[in-house]
Amino acid sequence: MRLPLVNLTPHEVTIFDADDKVVVRCPAASKPVRVAVDRCEIGRIGGIPVFAEDYGKAPLLPEPALGVWYIVSSTVAVAHPERHDLLVPTDLVRSPDGTILGCKALGRRNGS
């Protein structure tokens, strides 16, 4: 099944139906989209550094395209609240040891 989904994450996204059968596999992006992060150490707790982080925009994020939905990380979606075409994996499916196998749904972040 060909869907108008473009995976912009560094991981394959596997989507399962309600019966845990694979509906679609979206291959990992060859050039994943990431946000720029400015970090500044603001202190330490028991020797562990604590940083203030400011997330910028994702420079490799493609322009919107009619009928196309982009699968991105939560960080990318939050950094681009003006975009209504960004989806993140949700309702995660995990193996018995907790490894993420995929998801059962895609979601939009509030503000998107």
Image (cartoon, rainbow, N blue to C red):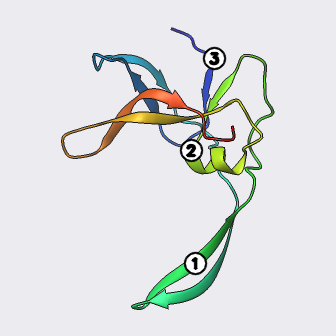
Q: Quadrant of residue 62?
A: top right
Q: In the displayed structure, would residue 48 be above or below residue 2?
A: below
Query: Is residue 63 shown to the viewer in this render?
Result: yes
Q: Earlier in the sequence, mark 3 or mark 1?
A: 3
Q: From the viewer's perspective, tell me whether residue 56 is left or right of residue 97.
A: right
Amino acid, disc 1: Phe
Amino acid type of the residue that numbered disc 3 sits on in the rendered structure = Pro
**Which sits earlier in the primary sequence, circle 1 or circle 2?**
1
Q: Residues within 10 Å of mark 2 (few under 14, many from 20)?
A: many
Horizontal side of 57 relative to 97 (left or right) equals right
Callouts 3 and 1 close, C-beta under 8 Å:
no
Identified at 75% across, 53% down, the residue is: 57
Residue on which the image places disc 1? 51
Q: Which quadrant: the C terminus? A: top right
Q: Secondary structure at mark 1?
A: strand
> Would you name the residue on which mark 3 appears?
4
Pinpoint residue 4: horizontal percent, then vertical percent.
63, 17
Provide residue 15's location: percent of width, then percent of height. Answer: 42, 24
